[in-house]
């Protein structure tokens, strides 16, 4: 025990003396949270579109103003079609609506009138949105303007509710998930560097010849970075709840447990990388490729896992961030949903045990 | 010790197999690796604490041994300093202290004196001697034979083979009557050495020692009557060279291939009132000297005395706070690129690109010194011939034996026929034969008019110099030929004794000069 | 002078190329990631599971449920009979949405009263439920139209002709692949440069460079070009994959693509060299490049559109070269972007590259002391 304690104290001393540790544990998460809060805004977009109205009749102006009165579309009138096309090429506008000159005339004769909606498909998301939203506006305008004569009016009213996040604040959803990416910094990157550094500087050789066991060595790396990670995590949660006003509906105690488990898997990945690589460049490369990017892309943080092709869904099962993102979003927005917390925690436990065993196996006690 | 598994055979350390009973071994031996296992970002005390706990010392045991060890090593006043900020000698002492914790019965020291100045080295040896007297067994690996001479028994290994085992004295005594000093009549010791080596017949060893050449002859040889030979007592090093089959003979192949430097200016390196200040700390105070063409000029001094800083100012790595450095008459600050093209530079740890092959290193260095492709090819072929690099061309520089690394580094530094060569601790940790080989090359270069500037705290190297500037606390306290410096102390002292005596004298004067 | 720079460049190439492990680490990840993330990073919504609690159990309600069953968005539909099941499925995220049809649904329809359908979305998956609510509402509206308006032939109707220019079938995959080419090129560029100075400084070979007749700006050039070339090769590989493996038509000019790729990578290499030259240890350099990469990726307009960011952040994105490069790459792939528009986006990157390279040069120069 004294040996373990001594190693841990050593690790803490090193951590405290290195200003970059504090930078990584506190300053950087803060900056990243701000970046996630403000730049990863998936709320419905405000898009500028162009409208070219070739029909001068009076009732059409109500269609144009229907476009003007929405929250999400900012219409800009064009009289020159070529100009409008140049603008969509440049990306100044993301869509265009073209109303032909016989539009109202045809409608008046109860004929089918045509309208053109063109979107900028290079921004696929936005294009989808523009197409759907314009269709809705036009249809809505049509039913309101041309009252249907002689029809009974049993209308179905759709009552939509968004549970847990009534306002659909996307940052309620993004921030709890983003914690997983931010934690890869402390968990994987920092730990990936520490063991590799001991090999590079030759201190590992001195450690091996003392009486420490592998377990001592591993725990002495796990424990300090676990503590640092937990403090950093607490700081991030505080920042999310107090500064950014994300509701926290679950139990903080449970949150501590799942973040602890998640950190164990991260530290495991970091230590495994550096144990195998023994040099900082390779270890950090592995941390980036195996930790940060998958946590961002495959964890369900931004992109829904259910939409991914099956092989990739399968792959995502090996990303510990996936399990943490699930737990974190639930504990923040919904509460203690055991059906989710328990299986996800079990997966994280299994992962951290496997990682620990792998590291244990590959930790060298000799130089060759 | 169980760090490497033997491919075959058996190791018994303290009566057990170290690979099987690792725990027992780790408990009973102290180990100090080559790259000290110190955490540079921990303080002295924290390092000690860590290793004490790792060895499982109890609290009062700890307190007691800290006290003795700090006393013993003289680190008492530095306990709160970061290990990274200690000088090389102090680091080694701390490393020793750490490996001594828990009173191991067996102490293993892997080249503990590399990069340590003579004063610290003497202290280190004294400490180890004390431990020995207390009954501890110590294994000290080294490439320096003057250290080995002081031990009670030694094991001589070359290329993995055991050459000798026993007391150093027994080996040395066999050479009685074979060692001499030769003096050149005209004082040109280098020419004399070259001549002696060129003959080679019946010669075991020849090295420059101040203004003489130390010669070891083969048994029963009575040649060299033409030389003025004066008998002297043999050293362990002589004996080792004898066992290894004598020093490299013949001429350095450099002598045929190098152009002679002809330049009118008499002083090729000039330092004029160089000062380097870091905050309120003077690394170098008012340093002035001139180096003549074709001279070997040595900067000698303990760690942290400012010799490296002076050296770096002269080759433009560090900008002086005030004063000027001139290379071939050019102010280095004003004509950096031009002045540097006159320099060959060989850095302390050879600074090769370890991940690149020997060939790629050669190509790179020839390229950055501005040789065109054809010149490069010729020059590289020439260097490969001279330094026998052929078998290693495809190897990574990292994998080379130390001696070849040194050759490669030298050949890289010579790519552009520089009239001036800067060597920063060129033979740290290199074995005696390679060292001789290296200095033969250097001597040949000097004969051709190349000026060599060398920093060292290795006394053998100091002997090779024409003039030495002794650095201490940022000042050049003495300058002169090796003999002059020695004579300042006593008639027949060694260079090391002279070095220590001069520094102690300076310290005494300083204390006297201080107001009471 | 060129001999010297050339030698330095060759050395840099060798040190990247010689070690097979580092070679693999530089070339493989971008290509593998391109393959995986291209399919993973999709904002499309599909394979949705939903739960229906039909309390009405009539022709009308069954018909409505059928509509969901037949829609392409949904994979599995759970039918439940009581509220607790309904809630449980939603709560445990087994389903993304629930539809609750009250037992007076058909009665109200027949009585021409307002009939209510409750749609419940999982707000935890904010972006998915938002898109999903659009689809679901559309399904219900269509149902309503078909059920009640059939038979009225003389209604005024609008035929909305939607065209998606530049990416006709709105292939999300195309959008992702093209954006990833830019993002992964940035990551490769930073990785190649991040350690180039810091590592040499730790080993001590940087001194060796400084003592040689190489001038600071020669070192800068020698250190800039090799990563630039290698990153361009990686970008080429990704371009080839995009066109031939993913079948994305490349509509613009290849010359413009390479020109802007070079300028973009130049700015990235400049940033990498600057960070690397500032750092004393490899660890700091690695962390430094991470600190740049993460926000750069998030604020590039790839994951979330720049128009959505607060004004202050929108200004910040002007300092982010990848923002401009994304516009160019997408433009060249999809829109056959004319050269003048390309140049409008090229100019800021070029300025960025000059500034960063100058900063790196300045640090090199200062390093002499």
Image: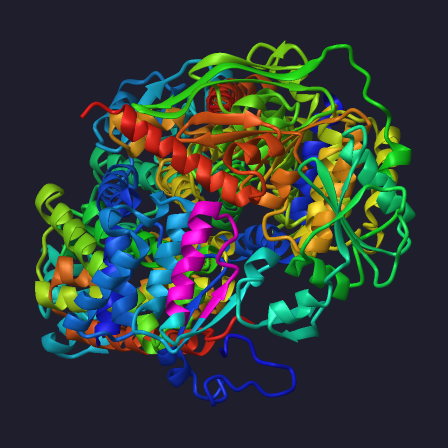
Q: Is residue A155 visible?
A: no
Who's the residue at 53% across and 47% down the image? C177
Who's the residue at 51% across and 50% down the image? C173
Q: Nearer the viewer, residue A118 or A253?
A: A253
Q: Is residue A368 left or right of residue A234?
A: right
> Please, what is the dominant secondary structure of the magenta stretch?
helix
Q: Is residue A294 left or right of residue A231?
A: right
Q: Is residue B500 left or right of residue A30?
A: right
x then y, percent, for residue C3:
76, 25
Quadrant location of the C terminus of chain B? top left
Q: Nearer the viewer, residue C192 or B70?
A: B70
Q: How many marks?
A: 0
| Residue range (magenta) | B108-132
Vertically, is C294 above or below B147?
above
x then y, percent, for residue C185:
54, 41
Q: Nearer the viewer, residue C326 or A33?
A: A33
* Residue A224 picture quarter: bottom left
Q: Nearer the viewer, residue A73 or B116?
A: B116
Q: Is residue C368 left or right of residue C253?
A: left
x then y, percent, for residue B20:
47, 88
Q: Is residue B3 visible?
A: yes
Vertically, is A58 above or below A352?
above
x then y, percent, for residue A269:
39, 65
Who's the residue at 36% across and 40% down the image? C291
């Amino acid at each position: 025990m004294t040996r373990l304690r001594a190693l841990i104290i050593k690790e803490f001393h090193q951590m405290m003396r290195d200003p970059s540790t504090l930078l990584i544990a506190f300053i950087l998460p803060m900056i990243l949270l701000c970046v996630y809060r403000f730049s990863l805004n998936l709320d419905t977009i405000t898009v500028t579109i162009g409208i070219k109205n070739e029909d001068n009749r009076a009732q059409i102006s109500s269609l144009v103003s229907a476009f003007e009165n929405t929250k999400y579309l900012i219409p800009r009138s064009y009289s020159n079609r070529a100009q409008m096309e140049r603008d969509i090429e440049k990306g100044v506008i993301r869509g265009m609506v073209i109303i032909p000159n016989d539009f109202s005339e045809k409608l008046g004769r109860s004929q089918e009138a045509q309208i053109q909606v063109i979107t900028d498909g290079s921004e696929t998301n936005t294009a989808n949105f523009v197409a759907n939203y314009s269709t809705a506006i036009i249809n809505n305008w049509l039913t309101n303007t041309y009252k249907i004569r002689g029809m009974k009016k049993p209308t179905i009213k759709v009552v939509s509710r968004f549970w847990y996040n009534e306002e659909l604040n996307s940052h309620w959803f993004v921030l709890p998930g983003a914690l997983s990416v931010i934690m890869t910094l402390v968990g994987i990157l920092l730990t990936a560097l520490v063991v590799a550094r001991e090999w590079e500087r030759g201190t590992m050789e001195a450690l091996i010849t003392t009486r420490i066991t592998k377990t001592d060595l591993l725990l002495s790396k796990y424990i300090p970075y676990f503590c640092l990670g937990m403090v950093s995590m607490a700081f991030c949660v505080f920042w999310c709840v107090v500064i950014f006003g994300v509701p926290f509906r679950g139990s903080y105690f449970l949150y501590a447990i799942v973040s602890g488990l998640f950190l164990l898997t991260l530290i495991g990945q970091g230590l495994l990388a550096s144990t195998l690589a023994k040099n900082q460049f390779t270890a950090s490369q592995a941390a980036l490729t195996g930790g940060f990017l998958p946590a961002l892309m495959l964890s369900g943080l931004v992109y829904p896992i259910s939409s991914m092709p099956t092989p990739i869904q399968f792959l995502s099962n090996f990303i510990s961030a996936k399990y943490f993102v699930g737990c974190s979003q639930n504990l923040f927005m919904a509460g203690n949903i055991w059906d989710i917390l328990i299986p996800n925690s079990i997966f994280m436990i299994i992962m951290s045990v496997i990682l620990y065993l792998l590291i244990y196996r590959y930790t060298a006690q000799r130089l060759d | 010790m169980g760090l490497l598994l033997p491919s075959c055979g058996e190791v018994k350390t303290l009566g057990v197999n170290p690979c099987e009973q690792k725990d027992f071994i780790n408990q009973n031996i102290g180990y100090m690796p080559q790259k000290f296992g110190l955490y540079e970002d921990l303080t002295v005390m924290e390092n000690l604490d860590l290793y004490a706990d790792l060895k499982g010392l109890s609290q009062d045991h700890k307190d007691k041994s800290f006290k003795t060890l700090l006393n013993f090593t003289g680190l008492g006043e530095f306990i709160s300093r970061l290990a990274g900020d200690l000088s090389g000698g102090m680091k080694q002492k701390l490393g020793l202290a750490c490996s001594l914790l828990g009173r191991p019965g067996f102490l293993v020291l892997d080249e503990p004196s590399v990069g340590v100045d003579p004063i610290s080295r003497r202290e280190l040896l004294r400490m180890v001697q004390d431990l020995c007297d207390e009954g501890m067994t110590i294994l000290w690996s080294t490439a320096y034979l003057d250290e080995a001479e002081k031990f009670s028994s030694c094991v001589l290994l070359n290329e993995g083979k055991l050459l000798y085992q026993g007391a150093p004295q027994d080996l040395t005594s066999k050479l009685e009557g074979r060692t001499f000093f030769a003096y050149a009549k005209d004082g040109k010791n280098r020419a004399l050495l070259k001549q002696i080596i060129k003959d080679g017949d019946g010669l075991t060893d020849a090295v420059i020692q101040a203004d003489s050449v130390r010669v070891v002859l083969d048994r029963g040889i009575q040649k060299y009557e033409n030389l003025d030979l004066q008998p002297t007592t043999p050293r362990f090093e002589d004996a080792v060279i004898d066992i290894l089959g004598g020093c490299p003979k013949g001429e350095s192949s450099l002598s045929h291939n190098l152009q002679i430097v002809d330049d009118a200016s008499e002083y090729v390196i000039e330092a004029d009132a160089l000062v380097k200040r870091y905050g309120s700390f003077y690394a170098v105070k008012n340093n002035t000297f001139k180096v003549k063409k074709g001279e070997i000029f040595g900067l000698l001094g303990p760690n942290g005395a400012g010799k490296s800083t002076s050296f770096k100012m002269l080759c433009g790595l560090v900008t002086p706070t005030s004063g000027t450095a001139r290379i071939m008459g050019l102010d280095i600050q004003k004509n950096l690129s031009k002045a540097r093209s006159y320099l060959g530079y060989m850095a302390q740890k050879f600074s090769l690109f370890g991940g690149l092959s020997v060939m790629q290193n050669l190509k790179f260095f020839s390229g950055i010194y501005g040789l065109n492709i054809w010149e490069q090819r010729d020059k590289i072929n020439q260097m490969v011939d001279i330094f026998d690099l052929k078998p290693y061309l495809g190897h990574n520089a990292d994998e080379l034996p130390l001696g070849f690394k040194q050759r490669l580094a030298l050949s890289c530094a010579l790519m552009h026929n520089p009239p001036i060569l800067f060597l920063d601790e060129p033979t740290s940790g290199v074995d005696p034969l390679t060292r001789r080989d290296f200095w033969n090359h250097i001597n040949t270069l000097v004969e051709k008019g190349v000026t060599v500037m060398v920093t060292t705290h290795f006394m053998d190297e100091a002997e090779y110099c024409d003039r030495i500037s002794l650095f201490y606390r940022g000042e050049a306290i003495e300058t002169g030929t090796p003999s002059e410096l020695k004579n300042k102390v006593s008639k027949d002292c060694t260079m090391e004794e002279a070095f220590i005596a001069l520094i102690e004298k300076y310290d005494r004067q300083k204390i006297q000069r201080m107001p009471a | 002078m060129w001999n010297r720079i050339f030698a330095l460049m060759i050395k840099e190439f060798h040190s990247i190329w010689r070690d097979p492990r580092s070679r693999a680490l530089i070339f493989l990840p971008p290509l593998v990631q391109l393959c995986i993330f291209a399919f993973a990073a999709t904002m499309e919504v599909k394979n949705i599971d939903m739960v229906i609690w039909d309390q009405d159990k009539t022709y009308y309600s069954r018909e409505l449920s059928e509509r969901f069953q037949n829609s392409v968005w949904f994979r599995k539909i759970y039918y439940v009979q009581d509220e607790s099941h309904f809630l449980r499925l939603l709560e445990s995220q087994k389903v993304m949405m629930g539809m609750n049809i009250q037992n007076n649904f058909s009665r109200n329809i027949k009585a021409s009263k307002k009939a209510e359908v409750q749609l419940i979305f999982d707000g935890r998956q904010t972006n998915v439920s938002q898109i999903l609510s659009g689809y679901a509402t559309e399904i219900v509206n269509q149902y309503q139209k078909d059920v009640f308006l059939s038979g009225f032939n003389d209604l005024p109707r609008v035929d909305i002709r939607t065209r998606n220019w530049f990416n006709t079938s709105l292939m999300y995959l195309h959008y992702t692949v093209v954006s990833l080419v830019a993002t992964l090129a940035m990551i490769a560029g930073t990785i190649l440069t991040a350690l180039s100075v810091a590592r040499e400084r730790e080993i001590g070979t940087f001194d060796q460079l400084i003592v040689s007749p190489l001038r600071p700006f020669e070192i800068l050039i020698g250190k800039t070009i090799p990563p630039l070339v290698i990153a361009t090769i990686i970008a080429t590989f990704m371009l080839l994959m995009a066109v031939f493996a993913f079948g994305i038509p490349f509509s613009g000019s290849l010359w413009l693509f390479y020109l802007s790729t070079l300028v973009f990578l130049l700015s990235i290499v400049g940033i990498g060299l600057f960070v690397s030259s500032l750092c004393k240890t490899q660890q700091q350099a690695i962390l430094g490049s991470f600190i740049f990469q993460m926000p750069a990726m998030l604020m590039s307009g790839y994951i979330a559109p720049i128009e959505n960011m607060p004004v202050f952040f929108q200004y910040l994105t002007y300092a982010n070269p990848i923002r401009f490069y994304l516009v160019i790459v997408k433009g060249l792939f999809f829109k056959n972007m004319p050269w003048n528009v390309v140049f409008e986006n090229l100019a800021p990157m070029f300025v960025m590259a000059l500034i960063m390279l100058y900063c790196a040069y300045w640090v090199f120069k200062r390093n002499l002391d």
